[in-house]
Image (spheres, grey):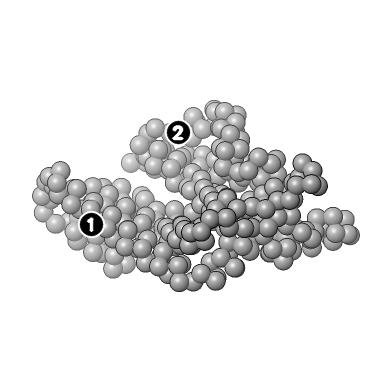
């Protein structure tokens, strides 16, 4: 690819020893491009206010949301009734501050900008560290930006289509008394949806983290197999922190996280085999 060829030429030039300030200047350039990418994504999200809020942000609070419809269809197939159908989300969203809606518009646009620019941010990080790697090392981590981005977006989709609606339907309809009406502040609602979705995307980067730890010799497949039970406990704790305090959401987060842990063991094992083959 053109990008790879360009980086290869840069790497194969006469190796001049870069000073500390040269590295700082190079890092500044990559950070600047990453910030520009986030800014472009933020502006694009800001001008698409109706789609971002009415379709995406407030989608999971409508009873015709994809997840609720799938659960209802599943209920009809299994129970032949509306047991798992959602008829009312159980709460309304309100704004109680003068600048609340504008502030949340800016916040959501920024989060969307980070999500949209995530592959480009990873690319800039990769371009910064790539010259320091040998050709053989670069070949071993080829496609790292692509796979990291895929895992991140899978996590985002999982958080948005599974964790968020399940959590909203539980917490939104939960009442200590019929005398209490759930009227959720706009900031609270958006923080809940954005944090849960973004956190899930980040957590799904576990295999990439394990890959690099295995490359550095810090983590091994044998170590991960030996401490499976401890890892499962840690995953439960992470799931409890990331998700709301309801069992269903925690289980939904725990299952894929443990699956990623097992997948990470396979990755660590392959890294060790490649090391022994050298």
Residue 87 as seen in the image, left or right of residue 215:
right
Q: Going by the picture, which residue comes out furthest to the right?
A: 80
Q: Is residue 52 left or right of residue 13?
A: right
Q: Earlier in the sequence, mark 1 or mark 2?
A: 1
Numbered label attached to residue 220? 2
Return the residue at label 1. 29
Q: Residue at x 28, y 54 (%)?
A: 31
Percent across and percent down for residue 194 are 53, 53
Q: Are marks 1 and 2 in contact (CB under 8 Å)?
A: no
The number of callouts visible is 2
User: In the rendered view of the protein, which quadrant contains the N terminus?
Assistant: bottom left
Crowdedness near tag 2: few (<14), some (14–19) or many (≥20) residues, C-alpha within 10 Å: many
Instruction: Pick the residue in front: 184 or 134.
Output: 184
- In depth, the one of 198 and 57 nearer the eye is 57
Coordinates of residue 268 in the picture (x, y in percent): 46, 40
Tell me if residue 109 can be seen: yes
Residue at image x 51%, y 69%? 49
Quadrant containing the C terminus is top left
């Amino acid at each position: 690819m053109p990008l790879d060829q360009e980086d290869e030429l840069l790497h194969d030039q006469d190796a001049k020893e870069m000073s500390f300030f040269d590295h700082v200047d190079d890092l500044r350039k990559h950070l600047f491009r990453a910030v520009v990418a986030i800014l472009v994504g933020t502006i694009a999200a800001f001008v698409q206010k109706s789609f971002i809020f009415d379709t995406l942000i407030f989608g999971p609070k409508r009873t015709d949301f994809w997840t609720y419809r799938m659960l209802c269809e599943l209920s009809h197939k299994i129970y032949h009734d509306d047991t798992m159908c959602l008829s009312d989300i159980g709460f309304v969203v309100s704004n109680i501050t003068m600048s609340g809606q504008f502030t949340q518009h800016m916040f959501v646009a920024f989060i969307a900008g980070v999500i949209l620019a995530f592959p480009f941010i990873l690319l800039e990080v990769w371009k910064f560290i790539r010259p320091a790697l040998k050709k053989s090392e670069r070949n071993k981590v080829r496609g790292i930006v692509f796979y990291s981005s895929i895992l991140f977006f899978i996590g985002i989709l999982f958080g948005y289509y599974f964790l968020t609606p399940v959590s909203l339907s539980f917490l939104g309809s939960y009442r200590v008394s019929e005398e209490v009406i759930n009227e959720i502040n706009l900031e609270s609602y958006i923080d809940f949806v954005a944090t849960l979705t973004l956190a899930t995307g980040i957590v799904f980067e576990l295999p990439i983290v394990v890959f690099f730890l295995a490359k550095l010799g810090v983590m091994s497949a044998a170590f991960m197999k030996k401490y499976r039970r401890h890892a499962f406990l840690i995953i439960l704790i992470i799931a409890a922190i990331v998700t709301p305090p309801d069992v269903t959401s925690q289980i939904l987060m725990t299952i894929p996280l443990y699956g990623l842990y097992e997948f990470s063991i396979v990755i660590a094992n392959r890294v060790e085999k490649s090391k022994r083959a050298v």
